[in-house]
Each structure stands twice: as C-alpha cells, then as structure tokens.
Image: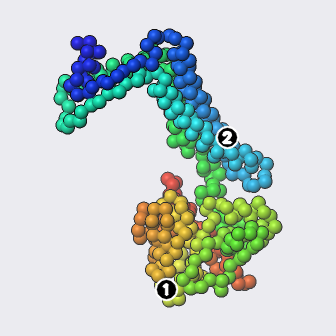
Amino acid sequence: MSPEQLARLAGELDEVEVVHNTPKFPIAGTRAEKRAERTVALWFVISALSGLAFVIAFIWWPWEYVNVGEPGYTIYSMYTPVIGFTFGFAILAMGIAVIQAVKKLFPDEVSIQQRHDGPSDELDRRTLVAQLTDAGNGTTLGRRKLIIRSAGLAATVVGIGTGVVALGGIIRNPWAEGDEAPLWHTGWRPENGETVYLRTDTGILSEIARVRPEDMEPGSMMTVFPYRESERGHEEELLHAQRASDAPVMLIRLRPGTVVNARPGQEDFNHGDFYAWSKVCTHVGCPTSLYQAQDNRILCPCHQSQFLATEDARPVFGPAARPLPQLPITVNDEGYFVAVSDFVEPVGPAFWERPKTT
Ligand code: FES
C-alpha cells in the first residue's frame, strides 16, 4: 500500500472521519504562497537574530556591579532587561513563526474521531506512522526549504542561547578575587577599623537610625542593615549598604528567660536576649521575614521553611537544609548595637565551594 492509502486506512481504523480538507494553496508556487512562506521565514530569522543578540549580551555585556551614579551604572543596570528581552523575544518570534506556518500553510481540515480505549496493535502503530508522514506531507513543509532552513537556524541559535545560560556560570569566574570574592564577604565586614552599626530603615535614606537595645520590646524583631559613619551624607554608599542582597539581618529580642543552644564557637555572638541572624533564607535566598514569638520560629514565606531561634536558627521544617548564619553583635560605649565581625560563614543558599560548617 502507498503511504497515502495507509494513511487513509489509518483514519478508517481509528474511526476518524475527515469532514473536509482543503489545501491553503492548491496551486504550488503562486505569489501569495511565496509571500506566506517569506513571512514565516522572516519570523524564524528574527528569532535567530534575537537569540544571537542574547548570547552576545549574556557573555559580553558589562554585568559587574556598579554603584548608583558611578560611570557605567546605566549600562550595568541594563544587563538584566537586555538579556531578558532578547531571550524572551527569540522565543516569542519562534512561537509566532510556528503559528504563522500553521495558519498560512497547513491545509484546513476538520476531522471527527470516535473515542476508544486500550493499547494500539501492530497495524495501528504502522498506520499511525504513515498517517503522520502523510500529514507532514500535507503541510507542504517538506518542499519549503526557506522555512526549514530559517527554522533550523532559529532553533540552533535559541538552543545555543539556552546552553549559554547553563554554561554561563562556568564562563565567568566568581572566584577571580580569591579570598576577597564577594560570596565570602558581606557589608558587615569591618574595614580599616571602622565600626559597623546596626541601622534600621525608616524609609528615608539620609535618616540614620542606629539601634539601641531599648528600641525593642521582648519578643520582637527588627530588620537591620550595616552602617558606617563614613557613609553619612553619601547617598550612593548608603543605598549600596542597604540594597546589597546579603545585607539584611533580623535582630530578634527573645523573651526573657528563653534558653538558646548556640552553635559551638558562637556562644558569645548574641548580646543578652538579642540575636542577629541573616535574613537571607538558606534554601534559595528569600527573605525570612516572619518571626513568631510564641514558639520562637523564624518563617520563610517562599517555601515555608521554619528555623528555630532557640536552636541557633537551625531549620526544623521545609526545604532549607542549613541554619541561618548568625552575626556576632555587641553594644558599644555609646549604647548602640555594632557588629563584632562579618558572618563567619557565607550567607544565603549553598554553593559548591562553600565549606561545610554544619
Ligand atoms: S527560600 Fe526560604 S524556604 Fe525556599
């Protein structure tokens, strides 16, 4: 039997009734057909160009952090929108190309099939292959080399773009600065002997609200950020200190008499009932913004991880696997909370090179 006969037989065996089937272009090679073909190919080419732009931007666009107002800030701030737009547009253009191909080139067909259950037998499987082949021939894509080539180009470039995302972390070396690499340090690290205060956010950047123990009630929580006196009056530096993703810390005042099992070596990281833990969840980095004083649990709203404050903020529920890093704090001569040092371990989600600390 010829493929066409097998395809017809397949339809009959499957109780499919073709109500009507009309080719879009019964006469091949007309100007209208070529125009439709070029439209589809154009969208595939646009998809390929966007994918190429994405790859170039992903690899070569200046992505290293630049402070607000410093030279290169505008270009740096465009990095995420540019790679998002180019990759998104590549996928969108490919989708449009496929829709255009179906709408403009595939035959108009209406079929009705009766439902039946059970596995397919050998004859059904063979005829299905023939049916698909016949359907493929009906789309006329087989003889449309322009569309096939442009679709292949777009799929290749977008595929490479997807691969670049996966390989991007290997192309860039986050450890280029060695021990000074940003993953090891946060803005809490005292530099040049300057005191790092715990500051709360009042909503006004220039308003410096350093925190004292008497500012908090027992059983309360406050989000704090690092602050140095040398930053006073410098908007960019204040902004940077406050916006750094690893900066937020939860300052918690436990209720009097609450017993905390500190981690070995961290017994003096607290100041009385005051404990400071990184607010960056150790699962995938959401802010663990909720503190439940009744049972001393810190909750992460993203995937419901819970950390027990009385057990050195170790996870007791949810997907997080490591305790929240604790910031060593004390109160200075002026009565303000200050950081004794940076965190003694990296904050946030784990990464391969992170040493095991728990
Ligand atoms: S990021 Fe906190 S539980 Fe997932």
- 22 or 311, which lies in front? 22
Q: Secondary structure at mark 1?
A: loop
Q: Is residue 285 left or right of residue 56?
A: left
Which kind of residue does numbered mark 1 sit on? Answer: Thr
For residue 258, which numbered disc appears in the image?
Answer: 1
Is residue 235 shown above or below 333? Answer: above
- 180 or 251, which lies in front? 251
Separation (CA) of disc 1 from disc 2: 51 Å
Using the rendered image of the protein, determine whether residue 141 is visible from the camera's viewpoint.
no
Q: Position of residue 348 (x, y in %)?
A: 54, 61
Answer yes or no: do the residues labelled 1 and 2 have beta carbons within 8 Å? no
- 148 or 5, which lies in front? 5
* The N terminus lies in quadrant: top left
Residue 181 falls in which quadrant of the image?
bottom right
Q: Is residue 351 left or right of residue 180?
A: left
Using the rendered image of the protein, determine whether residue 323 is visible from the camera's viewpoint.
yes
Which kind of residue does numbered mark 2 sit on? Answer: Trp
Local packing at callout 1 (Cα closer than 10 Å; few below 14, some 14-19, many 20+) is: few
Q: Position of residue 333 (x, y in %)?
A: 72, 84
Please name the residue that numbered disc 2 is placed on.
Answer: 61
Q: Residue at x 35, y 27 (%)?
A: 110
